[in-house]
Amino acid sequence: MYRPTRGTKETTLMETAVTDRQGALNSERLAELCRALGHPARIRILQLLRRTNKCVCGEIVDSMPLAQSTVSQHLKQLKSTGLVKGEIEGPRTCYCLDREQLDRFKETIANL
C-alpha cells in the first residue's frame, strides 16, 4: 500500500504508479484499481460521473439507494486510486472523473 514519505505532499496512488515504456500500469497497481472497482456502488458512481460529464456534488447521494456516509466512503476509495477527483466548493466537495487516469486504466486492460 502507498504511504507518503516524510516531508512530501501526499499524492494519489495513481500518481505514484510505476509504468512501463508504453505507459501501461504495473500489475500491482492494476490490482489496486480492480479492487477499487470491485463494488457495484463504485461502478455506479463512475457511470453517473461519466454520464453527467461535469463535477457533481450532492446528486451522487440523491441518485443512489445508499446512506450519505456510505457513498462518501465509496468516493473516498475511488479518489484514493485517482479515478475520481474531488474539489471543495464551499461547504461540500464536488467530484468528477479523472479521464486521463481512467483512459490509462482502460488502455492497460485492453492490452492484457
Image (cartoon, grey):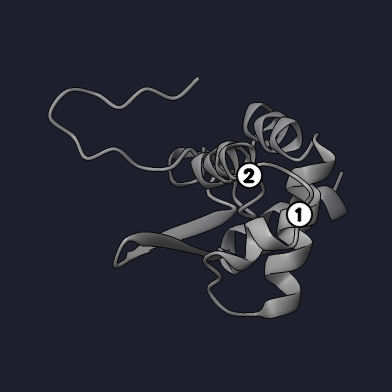
Q: Please provide percent x and percent y for residue 94.
A: 46, 65
**The C terminus appears in which quarter of the rendering?**
top right
Q: Quadrant of residue 67?
A: top right
Name which residue type carries label 1: Met
- In the image: residue 22, left or right of residue 110: left
**Closer to the camera, 83 or 72?**
72
- In the image: residue 36, left or right of residue 69: right
Please, is residue 85 above or below residue 72 in the view?
below
**Which residue bears the numbered disc 1?**
64
Please, is residue 84 above or below residue 67 in the view?
below
Q: Marks 2/1: CA distance?
A: 8 Å
**Closer to the camera, 7 or 62?**
62
Name which residue type carries label 2: Val
Residue found 56% across the figure and 70% down from its top: 56
- Taking the view exactly as shown, the residue that stands out farthest to the bottom is 53
Q: Please provide percent x and percent y for residue 7.
A: 12, 29
Q: What is the total number of numbered labels drawn onto the structure image?
A: 2
Please, is residue 10 above or below residue 103 in the view?
above
**Which residue bears the numbered disc 2?**
71
Q: Which mark is residue 95?
A: none
Q: Earlier in the sequence, mark 2 or mark 1?
A: 1
Please, is residue 102 above or below residue 49 in the view?
above
Q: Please provide percent x and percent y for residue 99.
A: 61, 68
Residue found 67% across the figure and 67% down from its top: 49
- Taking the view exactly as shown, the residue that stands out farthest to the left is 7
**Closer to the camera, 83 or 8?**
83
Q: Please provide percent x and percent y for residue 14.
A: 51, 44
- Find numbered disc 2 in the image and state the secondary structure of the residue it sits on: helix
**Closer to the camera, 112 or 35?**
35
Callout 2–callout 1 Cβ contact below 8 Å: yes
Residue found 37% across the figure and 22% down from its top: 3
- Find numbered disc 1 in the image and state the secondary structure of the residue it sits on: loop
